[in-house]
Amino acid sequence: MKTILSTSLPTARPSLFSFEPNRSRTKVSLHNLVDQLLIGLQPLAMRRDNVVVNGIPEGICFIAEENLLAYVLWNLVSAVINTKQNECIYVQSLVDDERTFVGVKDAGTYLYRSLASEFRKLQHAAAQFGASIDCHNDHNGNANIVLSMSNRRLAV
């Protein structure tokens, strides 16, 4: 008779974005993280004849799980790159009293279509580090995408 240990059979697959207390949350520089992401996105930007500029000032740091933050930012910026052709794309930030915003203005008219299949996953991932994602049109009809993060996670 064979004995099967209960530990050898997984009961459920853990969610990729479920909160786990032992995930390593570290001090993450937004400027440096975006620089690294833009290096990886450079081939895509070049194929579409785009230039992507990191407009996030040095010194803005958050306590977050770096891979999760990178996942969200990568998908947002790559979606914008995919909707633009022969453009200069600026990744910018704004810090106010309660929140820090990282966004891309004039993200293109097809942004919603580009993000549709991943948006729910990105929203859920952003919520894991106290952030939310907003897509809206400004008064000129340009699509804008913004990642909004609570300043309670700002690192000194």
Image (cartoon, rainbow, N blue to C red):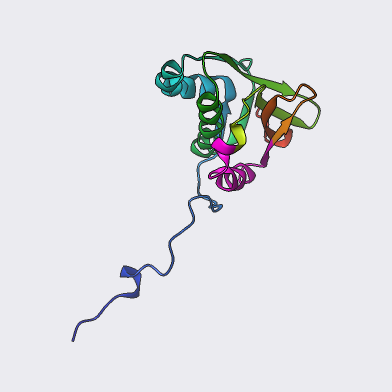
| Left or right of 115 in this view: 148 | right
User: Which residue is at 72% across, 36% downward?
Assistant: 152
* Residue 156 appears anywhere in the view: no
Residue, x 55% and y 47% (percent of image)? Answer: 121
**How far across and how far down the image is residue 21, in percent?**
55, 51
Front residue of this view, candidates 130 and 63:
130
**Is residue 93 at least partly visible in the picture?**
yes
User: Residue reaching furthest bottom?
Assistant: 1
Total numbered labels: 0
Q: Residue at x 61, y 46 (%)?
A: 128
Tell me the quarter of the picture where residue 87 sits: top right
Q: Quadrant of the N terminus?
A: bottom left
The quarter of the displayed image where residue 13 is located: bottom left
Q: Position of residue 143 (x, y in %)?
A: 68, 28
Frontmost residue, 58 versus 87: 87
Farthest left residue in view:
1
Apparent side of residue 10 relative to residue 110 in the rendered image (left or right): left
Picture layout, residue 118 above or below residue 86: below
Question: Does the magenta run of residues contain 119?
Answer: yes
Q: Which residues are magenta?
A: 113-134
Q: Hey, which quadrant is residue 65 in on the image? A: top right
The relative height of residue 154 versus residue 36 in the rendered view (above or below) is below
Name the residue located 20 percent from the left edge and 82 percent from the top edge. 2
Q: Residue 125 at x, y = what percent? A: 57, 45
In the figure, 2 relative to 117: above or below?
Answer: below
110 left or right, relative to 41:
right
- For the C terminus, the quadrant is top right
The x, y position of residue 137, in whole percent, is: 74, 29
Q: Is residue 80 above or below residue 42?
A: below
